[in-house]
Image: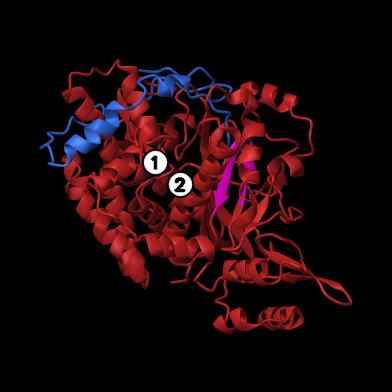
Amino acid sequence: MTEGDRRISPSPKEGERKLGEPGPKTPDIGRPSAENELLKRMRRIDPDQAKKYRQRSGQ
Amino acid sequence: MRAILAGIETEYGLLIAGKGAESQVEEAQALVREATNEGLGLWDDRHESPRNDLRGFKLDRLAYDPVDAAFERRVSAPAAQIREDRILRNGARFYNDHGHPEYSTPECFSLRELALHDQAGERIVLSAAREHQRRTGIGVTVYKNNTDFHGASYGTHENYLVPRGLALEALTENVTPMLVLRSLLCGAGKVGAEAGQACDFQLSQRADFLVEPINTETLFRRPIFNTRDEPHADPARWMRLHVISGDANMNPRCTVRKMALVKLSVSLAESGWSPPWRLRDPVSAFHQISRGSLDLAIEGGNAISVQRALEDYFAAAEERLELEPELSGAIRECRDLLTRLGDHERIAGYVDWAAKRMLVQMHLDEGGTWQDPMLRSIDLEYSNLDPESGLYYGLVAAGMIEPWSTDADVELRRRRAPEPTRAFVRGLAVERFSANLVNACWRSLTFRLSDRTIEVELQPDRLYPAHLSEIDDVEDFVRALQEQA
């Protein structure tokens, strides 16, 4: 996904070369026992939190 | 090798319920003002020079993101008033930087000390946010990250004291490739892309915003190697390596590692070494590593693996430098991580991007897809400073990331700077002599004494004597500082 609304520079570069495999591989997760508490915390997250999150550019 | 003084500045993301970026400057200003009990509003900005360039010129103006330039026009108060600059009793600086609460740690020689101060900064910012929420009744959330996922970025900058005599070319030849390479071991991770080639997940938060190899800019057209010449010390003796390309790290192990790697490259530059290869296009290489590529094009038509390139640095450091334990430990840890890169879960306790990728996978395993907006919210919430809801802290609470420090370790750094650098002296001045302190900055303190006002230069390469903390009389304190000059 590419969803930035802003231009990052006056002339952003596009289409960089690919030399290796694309993207980190999906890990084979062995579920730790404490996962339930963590999943509960994740389920409390507003799915649209990042959509609503707008910031000014900083340095 | 020379001990290198260093510091970290973090611009925090700020979400006020029901409000957007248009009022962010005023909100950040109000949030910083809540930290009244943490220090004094006496920051001295006379020595700041953000338009000076290490290459020997001064810019007429810095570039602004056009979207944010519109926000700037809304603000009419004087810049110093908007910043709400505060100098804290631990020697740190806390202020409003372009709408972001920014915590600048006290300067440290020890990277462990520095990472502890970075954690203390999280608590100071969170306390101010909670106070702001209590006073206004409006929800406040603070994030330690570098993007809003809509194309706005804000920085986590590192600063390293470097002798002015070191040639800039030697510094750039060593440091620029390392800033590219270290993303693999220190990136904070990001769901999706905001510029360039689309991807589901990448290692660096900042990569999409880096578009030039070298320049003075920080707000727009950001470079990998920043040439701002603002030494915060005697400019005849020192320059400051101002690194703006790194990510905000939640895991302090990453904070230590990313700065150890830069210290290694600076020390190698001072030793006369430079890598036996040159990246053909550092900006493209930064983007490629972030998207998981492990082979980079070098000049001469060949490629080099990221692991091999890092090993060149490590071998040269071991051969040429008398390494401090923190740096030799960092090399050992990096080599170990490089052998385990294929197993994200095994390195999740050490590398932020791997921990974040593991959380993303948990959502995917529950039936989610890469198109879910939830994934970016998971990314964002990884960096939420609230220990009760943030996902990094959730991983720590679940025992999936080992605690790196104790509560007492961090609280101590919130109150003072134990390492006796110039930050220790600055903190003493705030704590003990506030009635006489006129103003303060990184390089000096100005006192009003009975018969005069005097500015005392602080020495950035010095460890100050512990007995300074036992002096009760301001005249004696100033005299003792002058004897150290």
Which color is chain B depicted in?
A: red
Q: Which residue is mark 2?
A: B176
Q: Which residue, as the protein is rendered here, is positioned at the far left?
A: A30
Q: Which residue is mark 1?
A: B279
- Magenta stretch: give its range: B94-104
Left or right position of B142 against B438: left
| Quadrant into which the C terminus of chain B falls | bottom right
* Chain in blue on the image: A
Please say whether residue B421 is one of the residues in the magenta stretch.
Answer: no
In the rendered structure, are the residues bearing label 2 and label 1 in contact, judged by CB atoms less than 8 Å apart?
yes
Chain identity of mark 2: B
Mark whose residue sits in front, 2 or 1: 2
Q: Residue at x 54, y 22 (%)?
A: B18
Q: Nearer the viewer, residue B91 or B111?
A: B91
Amino acid type for the residue under numbered disc 1: Leu
| C-alpha gap between disc 2 and disc 1 | 9 Å
Residue B24 x, y percent position in the rendering: 61, 30
Q: Nearer the viewer, residue B95 or B441?
A: B95
Q: Is residue B156 visible?
A: yes
Q: Residue at x 56, y 25 (%)?
A: A9
Q: Residue at x 65, y 82 (%)?
A: B471
Q: Is residue B302 visible?
A: no
Q: Give the crowd class for mark 2: few <14, some 14-19, many >=20 residues within 10 Å.
A: many
Amino acid type for the residue under numbered disc 2: Thr
| Quadrant into which the N terminus of chain B falls | bottom left
